[in-house]
């Protein structure tokens, strides 16, 4: 399947965020009522759980208060603290660049696998994605099911459930929307990384296609991979394949949605601005819902 | 001087961004006209210039297209790219946390220097700052002077010049504004890191005080340290001392302002959402002007 | 206690390795019989267990075979692989510099705690230690007790046991010796890092003093901290205090001793050559026993 | 050319160091006279010059004296310093694993290029090399020419010059020797990394073949790539190709040889013990000459 290939020309590396017009941005800004700003990003805590095989987040101080206490040189009277991270780009709440997943040696829009080398991705990297400002829509599937959180087993969300959830909330999805699906999984797992990364409720591949057909710009979820993963049952990452590679829809993972859900708002101004790392495959982010 | 200490209580670690009310956010959202979204952040390019003594940005791929070309195991049919950075938190366009600069063993709001240790800052770190959504105001001093860029010598900007610039542009600064001062320096230096970090035009300490008195929420500039630095003439970082430590006003450095200046807009919806790194002293960011 | 302070002058930062004279080195070389070379170092395996709070070992390739398979530029016909590590200096088998542990604000030889800053240790760092070539003596306490490995409980080794062990082996400790104490702990724990770092058999503080009094140059052990650690029973690191700080005796930890023990040799030419990292607190090493 | 392929069996990943027998090690130990130990390794200094495109050495403290000065928790009375490096494996004096250079999709001994992936080299990595203890032979070509240092132009060293140099020194190369060729380049360049990495005197490809034919175990040099490199004249790395890939002879680069040369000794016990990093392409080392 090559859902949105060539839709924005053969050179395009940005995908579905192209669907957001200036008029849509202006309309989304018009959704702001109280001006409350909610961060949907996790605290980036050194040593926090990461999925298996990935690098843990480390944080080092190049200058700190202790240095001055034991004789460090002051500039004029100014004292400084400086620091460095070693950080996987898929750490904490993050947005996947379109290059993150592909199959059959072709990335989104037919760009070749060979553009992804040890020095980074020359195609479809996070530096090509740019910021996304759009209408955000929360689909609170956990609330729709009447549970705190979906379980891993039985946690697959199909298109019918997304549609019913939207209707019950009184919102209609539209082109250029950023859709945030709430499963409750992140909140339910808390600090238990082994549980959080051990399988998850999430959307199924039909739901992914359904969302892409509705021309959404971005899909986010409060789990680690957006899609339903049942150990020993599901295989591969078909939702990633459909959304990132076929349709050019970026994914935001580990989105913090509980406070947004508690606000009662299902439509809002959504803003995310990834770090424009040349050739990067993702970026940690703190997305915003402006209510 | 302890400008804003205790203004938001003895425990406050956020400073002047507290000045932005929900009503101000809503009003700023009302400034959106065309919905054009401008990123004000530099490309984060591995090996890009950093100031002396800081760690260079490095980017490593943990999986890439080459691995699959030589037999890497595919999951289902999914192929992945993953990556890691070693990154100074003051790399590229970045926002300084209030902990970044202090003097006399006390940080902003009287928090002790001893809270800044090898494991990070337990007070006034970037994790305490949170997102900032506000009215952005561009003060295009370069245009006001009729030059492409201010020089290092003669590049000090005082309060009178900021005021005259604002008046000539027809904007009035107000409480909770994010003020972006354009010197042209970043654009003039291009890739020449030695020139860029070798001194800079910028605001002087009187201008810093004047801005703090106007209750601005944040100050940004298209140079590396906001303030005028003339090698062999200026000493220390008095603007950092006044704004970060005395008044709790975060600084955004190396802001890309040329395209914004070319847009002709001096008021806009401004958004920045730092990485909430526990104990971090800054965060690379791609701030947004939404026109 | 200031055991060896000032013994090699007030500026000394090397400690007990000063005891090894050229004549001792030459004599130790005379111990070589078969010429068999045994490495006593662990494999440095990315993601291997490290003690709590330390950074995991990560390894990244800057160029690899995959890059060439997908079109990477060949120089002439040469193809390259290059790589980078993020590595704690106390990872795997390693030697502690004298700066690693101290008390009362003074390092070995009275050097001040204030010489140990965020940019590294200007006193007693691993760059000051230099290589150590000497007679190695294996004290196989596990064999002496007739067990595969000592347990955590009951695993304290006192001076009497060291002496009895040496006598039963027919070796006498002398000035300038590198003493390697075998508990069997590393081999018994295998890949179980939680067990390995959860407590350990090892020498007690009296044994540490006894070794220092015998003027040994270095002490090594097949555990993670040389000394007996029983969770909830022992407190602090008194053996580190006595050997590193009071007596200037470097420690080698996580030494691989099972194959050496199986060789039946208790005296041999010992060589270790730490990475001379300026200001480092330790170095991973692969020490050698040359039989 | 497949010089030593299959010589030690089709699975061999160690190459010419296999030539060193136990008897040779014992004989080399017999060369020790005064017992003086010379380190041939550079200081590993954070920020030191590295060749273009490689990662700079960084060093971070996880705990230091400053932390204790401002209230850090003491364990018992023990105080600690701990640290981390980000380090290219080809930093400073280092030994290249056989995997470092190849051509035509085959590594040393016919191992496939496809064994070198983002997670490291499963074939011919530094973990497969092991320690090398052997007779060291210094060929002081600079002294033989009567200059402090060879220049880049005219700095190619052929087999005839090596032979003449050996004869004038009264040493004969033999199987299993570690040959160290002194050009004076490292000492002449001092801290000038731009000069050091901008071209170099060194052996030519005929000398490489001549050394391999003499069955030497290792070749080292006081330059950054062992081989003659004249910008705009030489192309690729033919000496690397012949020695590493064809003949399985590891290379040691940036060896510090001036003090050894000053000692007047041309034969000695040589020891190097690389960090056994799984899948690594090289290791920083401090090789030893024991006189």
Image: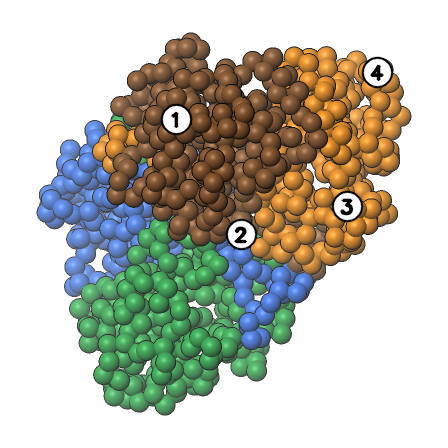
Chain colours: A green, B blue, C brown, D orange
Between B224 and A83, which is closer to the camera in this rendering? A83
Q: Is residue B95 left or right of residue D189?
A: left
What number is the disc on residue B60?
2
Residues at discs 1 and 2 in contact (Cβ within 8 Å): no
Q: Say which element carries label 3.
A: helix
Chain letter of the residue beneath label 3 in the structure image: D
Same chain shared by disc 2 and disc 3: no
Q: Position of residue D15 (x, y in %)?
A: 75, 43
Q: From the image, state whether disc 4 or disc 1 is nearer to you.
A: 1
- Kindly identify which chain the residue marked by label 4 belongs to: D
Inter-mark Cα distance, 1 to 3: 54 Å
Q: Work out whether disc 4 and disc 2 sit on a shared chain.
A: no
- Tell me: D212 left or right of C194: right
Q: On the image, which quarter does residue A221 sit in?
A: bottom left
Give the class, few, some or many, for how many residues have Cα within 10 Å of label 1's Cα (few <14, many ≥20). Answer: few
Residue D257: x percent and y percent?
68, 21
Crowd rating for badge 4 (residues with CA inside 10 Å; few <14, some 14–19, many 20+) = few
Marks 3 & 4 on one chain: yes
Identify the image quadrant of the C terminus of chain C.
Answer: top right
Residue occupying the point 76% across, 29% down: D24
Quarter of the image for residue C288 reads: top right
Discs 4 and 1 carry the same chain letter: no
Give x and y (percent) for residue D291: 67, 17
Per the image, the residue denoted by label 3 is D245
Picture disc at residue C160: 1
Q: Which residue is mark 4?
A: D170
Of the two numbered discs 1 and 3 in the rendering, the one whose residue sits closer to the viewer: 1
Q: CA distance from mark 3 to mark 4?
A: 31 Å
């Amino acid at each position: 399947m090559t859902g949105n290939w060539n839709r924005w020309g053969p050179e395009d590396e940005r995908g579905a965020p192209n669907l957001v017009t200036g008029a849509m941005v202006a309309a989304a800004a018009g959704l702001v009522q109280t001006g409350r700003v909610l961060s949907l990003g996790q605290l980036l805590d050194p040593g926090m759980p990461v999925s298996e095989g990935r690098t843990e987040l480390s944080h080092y101080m190049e200058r700190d208060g202790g240095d001055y206490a034991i004789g460090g040189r002051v500039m004029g009277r100014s004292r400084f603290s400086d620091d460095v991270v070693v950080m996987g780009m898929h750490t904490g709440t993050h947005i996947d660049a379109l290059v993150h997943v592909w199959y059959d040696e072709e990335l989104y829009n037919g760009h070749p696998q060979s553009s992804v080398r040890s020095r980074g991705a020359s195609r479809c990297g996070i530096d090509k994605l740019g910021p996304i400002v759009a209408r955000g829509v929360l689909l609170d599937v956990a609330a729709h099911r009447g549970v705190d959180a979906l379980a891993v087993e039985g946690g697959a969300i199909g298109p019918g459930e997304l549609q019913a959830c939207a209707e019950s909330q009184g919102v209609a999805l539209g082109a250029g929307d950023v859709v945030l699906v709430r499963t409750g999984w992140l909140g339910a797992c808390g600090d238990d990384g082994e549980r959080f990364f051990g399988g998850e409720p999430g959307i199924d591949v039909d739901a992914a296609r359904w969302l892409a057909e509705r021309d959404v710009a971005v899909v986010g979820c409060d789990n680690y991979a957006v899609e339903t993963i049942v150990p020993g049952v599901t295989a591969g990452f078909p939702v990633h394949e459909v959304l990132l590679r076929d349709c050019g829809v970026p994914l935001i993972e580990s989105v913090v949605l509980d406070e947004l859900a508690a606000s009662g708002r299902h439509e809002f101004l959504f803003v995310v601005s990834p770090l424009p790392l040349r050739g990067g495959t993702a970026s940690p982010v703190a997305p915003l819902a402006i209510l």
